[in-house]
Image: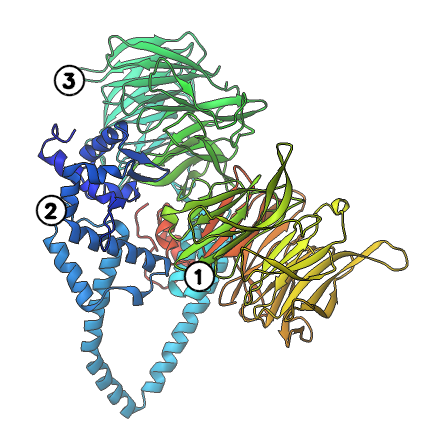
Amino acid sequence: MHDKLDAEGRAVLKHLLTRLVRVGDDGSPDTARPVERRALVHGLPGEPARRLIEQLTAARLLTHDQDTTRLSHEALIRAWPPLQGWVDADRAWLRLRQQLTDDAAVWDRSERDPSLLYRGNRLATLRDRLEDAAEGARELDSLPAAFKDASVRLEQRGVRRRRAAVAVLATLFLLATTGLVGSLVFQRQAEQAHQRDLARYLAAEAEDLRTTQPGLAKQLSLLSFEMNKDAGRSALLNSRRAPGLINGGQSATDLATSTDGKMLAISSGDWIVLRTKDGPVRVAADSVGAVAVSRDGRALAAVTHPDNGSEPATVRLWDLTRPAKPRPTAALKADGPVDTLVFGADGKVLYGGAGSGRVLRWRLTGPAAPAALPALDDRSGTIDSLAVSPRRDLLAAMSKDGRIAVWKVADPARPERVTTLSGAPYSVSAAGTLHRVAFDRTGMLLAAPMAVKNEYGLGLWRLDEPGKPQRIRREGEDGDYSSSNCIGDLTSLAFSPAHDQIVGACDTWHAWAYRSDSLDHLIVAGATISIPTGFKATGTILFDPGKSRRLMLTTDHGVLIWYLSNAMQPGADTTLPLPVGVGSQVDYRRAGRRQLMAWEGVGANYLADVTDLDNRRLVAATRAPDMFTGGDIALSPDGKLLADVELYKKDKGKARYVGVRLRDTTRDNTPLLSTIGDELHNGVQVIAFSPTEPLLAISDVNGWRNGNKAPTAVRLFDVKDPRHPREVGHINTDSVELAFSPDGRTLLASVGDVADKTTGRAAWSRLDSWDVTDPAHPTRLWTHRLPTGISSLNTAFRPDGKLLALYLGDGTLTLWPVAHDRLAGKPAATTQIGQYSSPLSFTPDGSRLALISTIISEGDDYTRPEIWDVSDPRDPTRESYLAEDSPGELYSVIFSPDGHRLAVARGSNAGGVDLWSITPTPLVNDLCESVGDPISRKQWRQYLPGRPYDPPCGTGG
């Protein structure tokens, strides 16, 4: 391959491969390094880089994950002399760039803390190495480049500040002599108070508009945060899943775009709206239906009707060489309706879907008028959807009866039907143009809806050999399957132009992630997003090729826009897509330089290293029992031990015994250290490590009360030597909730359904506090009786131990001061959150509390994670909330060790653990990618009268 490349190709190959190598330190070997695909090709010629990646992938030298690429075999680094030579020649620069990337990542995870930026000699060294680096190697990825630029700006500001210092001191001296300093300070304070009040007002308006005018709400949130970080924080965090809006107030029934995304056409009644970098252009036409844009953006086609849908249709063409002045070039009369249009990959042929299974064709080459070619005839129902593969010269035509014909159209004079597939029929009246069939960016995958019982799911086929399509099945699939199915018909499907994601529009819109290297375990169901109040989807969903994570959906009031940063859960930083078990618990700890997360799955427990979210990895998976027998998982305070509930013995070939196993997280494969099994008689409901002592508390209780075979107890184990844990004491209680105080002196244990001494019936529940300073002789300190009818609660201590949060089973949150190991006086606050309880988590600084709120009411049932500001325990306030889900689908929440993220265990769709950033600053760019049209001048005057017009994301759409 290398020898056949020209000089440019060899240079591109060199930069591609060296970016995939992590240079070793102190004699350690060079290793493979996963790189985000966007970063891999950054600064390289687009087409040569794409071709080389395809060739290396076909040769099995590259492996692709969801968003990253890596060398398939590290041996290539050592075994292929040219690569070794390239690495050795640039070793100093590669090592510096590697360190720069790592430092930039730390800076980004630390809310871009200025103290982490380069200064002095270190910054000078970076500048010198950049100047000396080989041409083409100087290009930095976006985050390292931002880190470098911020370092330079910081240095420049320092110089300016030093120069200004003398002038400021002199000015202050003069002001002080005239008594003006106090006046200026007062004026400044008044301005700050006004800014804060205005920011609060904008934040409140944004919340009111979030479901009806989401694009405006997003921009008001950004303006609020820009004015005052504290006042605008909540509104900004709440905006991350809200869409933006373009062409607002006007119905949109179809979308089409050029390959580079610089030309977008919107079908809107009697107009076609063209969106370009120079602004919108309106093209008048009668009753516009389907639209199409050539891949190069130089031609526009549209179906028009003289009388709102009457037959026959006219297909009109425009020359877009000058986008500001589209020039009509042809009007092609059809002999009946035309429901869909698409240009061929080379732009030389235009295809139109017509009745009786016919695909109309027109040749567009040459100076003469477009010439009709013989129609492709599949003798099926009306063709409602067409798709052309970007490569491989394939055309897919789907009819309303569900038949999908795939044609080879390399030679327009000799088209060949290569296969026919079966998809879902479409029998209802469409509000807009249908796009029910789609090719991926390689032309190797084809997607279309499939009927699944009474719903409609995603069908995905591999077309390695177009004449022998292979439908992709999930691992363990048996016959038809469901994958985020729609209750209504799927009207449109679209592949991401840069990521392994698919989206589909129906009653809501759905996302799926996939892998394209195997027929097994490919499709993972992702997010399901509802349409905002007041909008009705009209059918077309499309990715913006120019901004590959921007998603567009046509509605009766404009085009909604989302930023799909994460197909599993839009708005979240990432999702660990392994399914969680019902009621799954999560633990999140720092272990040296690593951050580890453990959670309960379906039939398995998982441990993952999430230090670097771009390179997260599964560390261990163990076998777990059912939810009644085992209900918890925990990491030790230092993260070095994992305690989980496992099936660990075999009886007649089946795993039957349940116990708590201690595993070493510091070693590969998390080896087993010991098993606490024979000491337990019922099951395991709660596991809790003491934060200060090598002490482990285990609630020996089966979640199914009738399944307890022996008296229940909380058992205390000395785990100083984790290979030989020793039971040192026990508490005779059947607690299903345990919590150590931060100083490790006391243990809280909740007891549910305490029997009334008179009637013998369960009447009330209680919370007990036990002194465990001598674990061999635990002593009860106090008992707090819960309100009548409350049989469950969750508890959490603030990290300083001076506040206890109680979240009762009826959704009441109580914050109670703690002094001298006891509840002090009356609660600081009692707040009704929802209707059920959930696990609680404090941030490390104790200022915020996370929980899950569940509301069950007629027509408005939901559950969602919420973050509450409890910096003043007497006045807790809801600061922000995350994505809503169906009741019962969210199980637990926990903050990361640094307090920058919140992990949420979710059971809906395929399930997983979502990690959400709770620091708003990094979200600003993502929000600006999807605000849509900027706030209008009229809206600006309404909300910010008297201020210069300055939209938060600029004036572009």
The disc labelled 3 sits on which kind of residue? Pro
Depicted 138 relative to depicted 65: above or below: below
| x and y, in percent, of residue 885 in the image | 56, 44
Q: Secondary structure at mark 1?
A: loop
Residue 463 in view of the camera: yes
Crowdedness near tag 1: few (<14), some (14–19) or many (≥20) residues, C-alpha within 10 Å: some
Mark 2 vs mark 3: in front:
2
Q: Secondary structure at mark 2?
A: loop
Residue 305 in view of the camera: no
Identify the residue at horizontal 26%, vertical 8% (top origin).
Answer: 414
Kindly report the distance in space between the C-alpha atoms of the residues bearing marks 2 and 3: 43 Å
Q: Residue furthest right?
A: 758
The disc labelled 1 sits on which kind of residue? Asp
Q: Earlier in the sequence, mark 2 or mark 1?
A: 2
Q: Earlier in the sequence, mark 2 or mark 3?
A: 2
Q: Residue furthest bottom?
A: 177
User: For this view, does 245 lie left or right of residue 410?
Assistant: right
Depicted 399 relative to depicted 820: above or below: above
Q: Which residue is mark 1?
A: 898
Kindly report the distance in space between the C-alpha atoms of the residues bearing marks 2 and 1: 39 Å
Quadrant that contains the N terminus: top left
Q: Nearer the viewer, residue 727 or 868?
A: 727
The disc labelled 2 sits on which kind of residue? Glu
Kindly report the distance in space between the C-alpha atoms of the residues bearing marks 3 and 1: 66 Å
Which numbered circle lies on residue 367?
A: 3
Mark 3 vs mark 1: in front:
1
Q: Nearer the viewer, residue 423 or 374?
A: 423
Depicted 763 relative to depicted 910: above or below: below
Q: Earlier in the sequence, mark 3 or mark 1?
A: 3
Q: Which residue is mark 2?
A: 135
Q: Secondary structure at mark 3?
A: loop
Label 2–label 3 contact, CB within 8 A: no
